[in-house]
Amino acid sequence: MKNILIAGGTGLVGKRLALRLIEKGYDVSILSREPKGSNHFYWNPAKKEIDQSVLGKVDVLINLSGAGIADKKWSHERKLELQNSRVGTNVFLYSLVDQMPNLKQFICASGVNAYGYNDAKIYSETDEFGSDFLSQLVRVWELSAEQFSTKCKVAKIRTAMVLSSKGGALGRLLPVIRFGLGSGIGKGTQASPWIHIDDLVEMYVFAIEKELEGSYNALAGYDSNYDLMKSLAQTLRKPYWLPNVPGFVMRRLFGEMALMLLNGVRASNEKITETGFVFKFTNLKEALSDLLKK
């Protein structure tokens, strides 16, 4: 079985992915600023520090690192942090590539918010990047990943909102809904692309086992913001009666980030399904029910 090294392996997706790969018999190592297990190894990309003893056996390198897009307002300093935590980690890992003689594949997290915002269009991986900040962030993120193509195969997983009861966007919404304060955002018709965390983890496993190359949209559906919030309230058996939060309020609260919240992205997942990958959860209500019953 292949030796897998995961950067960002202590995050929401990384933890689940590491456990799944171990279940399947892979030898999994995790890079962490605070190593806590026998398969954890120290790194600090900001300081260009890493335990190099883990590099020699790596067959597949996965980088899931990245500061949370919606965790803070996009000040100039925050934008730099968002970029450095993605592009900077890829650049640092690539600087070590000569110490990974067995490396066969590099898999990099990416974002489905790569295409700009046009509700009339369903985007595919061949479409151009948008001109907004988030689209351009994804562009340079993926360019930094492409450095590895001189050494090995490169796959980029353009991820939608990850549905998980353990954290992420859904984790932040649950307390609001449980208090009966759920409401739509802006016009509410904007598409909210999503993927169940189990499907995302299986997509990474699939990418490893099929040795995929290129960019792949990782989403199971793109329900409207209204349907997302209403389905969540119904799943939790909570009322859904408040009016939508107006766009000007969102812009006042979140600044430039409101663009992402008020506008949706519809994207196709045909490229990954045509390779043989099968999503387990393609119905939003079924996905939420599965997550919230656990």
Image (tube, rainbow, N blue to C red):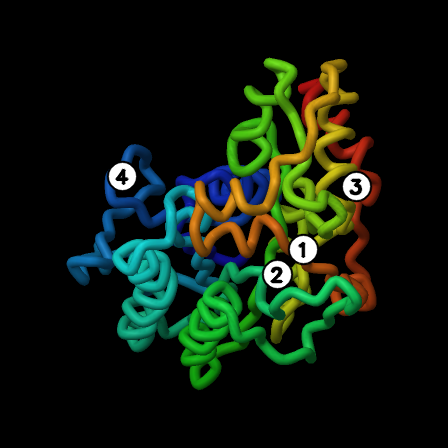
Residue at 76% in and 48% down: 189
In the displayed structure image, the side of residue 253 where residue 135 appears, left or right: right
- Dot 2 corresponds to which residue? 112
Task: Please identify, in this view, whether the residue under mark 4 or under mark 1 is nearer the observer.
Answer: 1
Tag 4–tag 2 contact (CB < 8 Å): no
Q: Quadrant of residue 271?
A: bottom right
Q: Viewed as shown, does residue 72 lie left or right of 33?
A: right
Residues under labels 3 and 1: Cα distance? 20 Å
The residue under the point 49% across, 63% down is 134
Secondary structure of residue under mark 2: loop
In the rendered structure, which amino acid carries the disc numbered 1?
A: Gly
Task: Measure the alpha-carbon separation of dots 4 and 1.
Answer: 38 Å
Q: Nearer the viewer, residue 111 or 30?
A: 111
What number is the disc on residue 264? 1
- Taking depth in this image into account, of 38 and 186 the one nearest to the observer is 186
Q: Earlier in the sequence, mark 3 or mark 1?
A: 1
Task: Give the residue pinned by disc 4.
Answer: 35
Left or right of 231 in this view: 154? left
> Which callout, 2 or 1, points at the residue further toward the start of the chain?
2
Three-letter code for the amino acid on which mark 3 is drawn: Phe
Whether residue 40 sits left or right of residue 132 in the image: it is left
Q: Position of residue 29 (x, y in %)?
A: 39, 48
Q: Tag 4 or tag 3, which sits nearer the N-term?
A: 4
Asked which quadrant contains residue 124, the reply is: bottom right
Q: How far separated are the C-alphas under marks 4 and 2?
A: 31 Å
Locate residue 68, reporting x and y percent: 42, 47
- Nearer mark to the viewer, of 3 and 4: 3
Tell me, yes or no, if residue 238 can be seen here. yes
Residue 102 point in image, percent of width and height: 42, 71
Where, quadrant-wise, is the C terminus in this rendering? top right
The circle on residue 281 is: 3
